[in-house]
Image (tube, grey):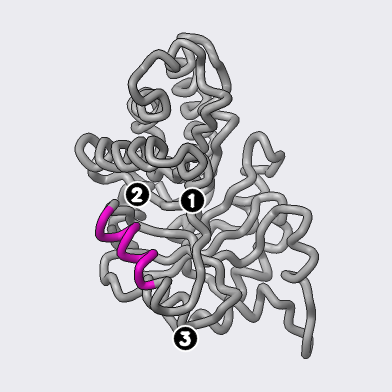
């Protein structure tokens, strides 16, 4: 999916919601544990309930890798299910990979060839040769970690040298590797006040913004400081949608929560004149 196709989906659904499939086995509704693949069955029902409001899904790989082979099988079935039933939805592997070139090449093969994700989150710390193997796939995206919302972000990301913060250096340097058609950036919603400065550096790129919902980030603040003329935002919500209920009605409640977010996003898109 390219830049314009993603923007068209945002306009069509009047939404820039990315639903995070952080499908923690310990939090699954108990009645699903009798299924052959509880995580996949949970994902399937969540996807069917929220697809009309979501332009993207983002499985966090930790919740799958921790289950071993069964987790990887559930992840693969999840991606295949989205591809087979909701072909126009953008799928992100939240893997946060980043290693020397030959290793990154194999990570890229795993996510782009074997599992057919649209994008993968990548850590930039090891530099250009750890990122560019992911960019060798013409139709795929890198989502580079820029400014995260966790407490430990202060340890490195705000380090300043020559009046430039480290996360700003990441934004500027990575422009040499790919343009807005191939590169997105992770910017945490709890750092929304920084989005104005970020937009001065990357005015046109899409931003993947986690932290709205259970983590306390403000959708209005993110839109105020981060939205551009093509929206330029994929705002992720995970727990606040998928674990809003843990009874047999979990999918119904998830749909309601996703609709609430979409309704708010529609208002913000109209205010910007995008729809």
Residue at (48% x, 34% y) in the render: 262
Return the disc, 3 or 2, that comes first in the chain's sequence: 2
* Residue labelled with disc 3: 176
Compare marks 3 and 1 and give the one earlier in the sequence: 3
**Cα distance, mark 3 to mark 1?**
23 Å
Task: Give me the C-alpha separation between circle 2 and circle 1.
Answer: 10 Å
In the image, residue 30 above or below residue 84? above
Q: Residue at x 34, y 62 (%)?
A: 3
Q: Is residue 81 magenta?
A: no
Helix, strand or loop at label 3? It is: loop
Mark number, residue 90 = 2
Left or right: where 8 falls relative to 14 = left
Q: Earlier in the sequence, mark 2 or mark 1?
A: 2
Left or right: 274, with 113 as reference point: right
Q: Is residue 108 magenta?
A: yes
| Nearer to me, 145 or 50 | 145
Outermost residue to the bottom: 162
Q: Are marks 3 and 2 in contact (CB under 8 Å)?
A: no
Q: Secondary structure at mark 2?
A: strand
At label 3, counting other C-alpha atoms closer than 10 Å, the crowd grade (few under 14, some 14-19, many 20 or more) is few
Contact? badges 2 and 1 (CB < 8 Å): yes
Front residue of 97/248: it is 97
State the extent of the magenta-drawn residues as a range.
105-114
Q: CA distance from mark 3 to mark 2?
A: 25 Å
Where does label 1 land, which residue? 234
The residue drawn where x is 48% and y is 55% is 95
In this rendering, the count of numbered labels is 3
Name the spot of residue 210 as percent of width and height, x first: 59, 48
Above or below — where is 68 with respect to 117?
A: above
Q: Quadrant of residue 243?
A: top right
Q: Is residue 88 above or below residue 107?
A: above
- Return the x and y of residue 78 as percentages of the image width and height: 33, 37
């Amino acid at each position: 999916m390219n830049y314009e196709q993603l923007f068209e989906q945002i306009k069509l659904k009047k939404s820039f919601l990315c639903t995070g499939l952080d499908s923690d086995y310990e939090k699954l509704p108990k009645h699903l544990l009798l299924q052959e693949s509880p995580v996949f069955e949970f994902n399937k029902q969540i996807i069917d309930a929220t697809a009309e409001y979501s332009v993207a899904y983002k499985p966090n790989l930790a919740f799958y890798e921790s289950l071993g082979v069964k987790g990887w099988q559930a992840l693969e079935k999840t991606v295949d299910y989205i591809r087979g039933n909701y072909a126009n939805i953008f799928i992100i592997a939240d893997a946060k990979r980043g290693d020397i070139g030959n290793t990154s090449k194999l990570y890229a093969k795993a996510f782009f060839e074997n599992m057919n994700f649209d994008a993968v989150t990548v850590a930039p710390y090891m530099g250009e040769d750890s990122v560019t193997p992911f960019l060798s796939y013409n139709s795929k995206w890198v989502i580079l970690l820029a400014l995260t919302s966790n407490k430990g972000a202060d340890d490195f990301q705000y380090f300043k040298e020559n009046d430039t913060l480290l996360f700003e250096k990441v934004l500027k340097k990575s422009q040499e590797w790919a343009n807005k058609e191939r590169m997105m950036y992770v910017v945490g919603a709890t750092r929304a006040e920084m989005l104005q400065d970020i937009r001065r550096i990357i005015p046109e790129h899409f931003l993947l913004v986690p932290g709205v919902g259970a983590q306390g980030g403000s959708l209005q603040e993110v839109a105020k400081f981060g939205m551009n003329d093509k929206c330029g935002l994929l705002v992720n919500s995970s727990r606040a949608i998928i674990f809003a209920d843990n009874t047999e009605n979990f999918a119904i409640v998830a749909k309601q929560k996703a609709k609430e977010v979409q309704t708010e996003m529609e208002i913000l898109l109209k205010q910007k004149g995008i729809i």
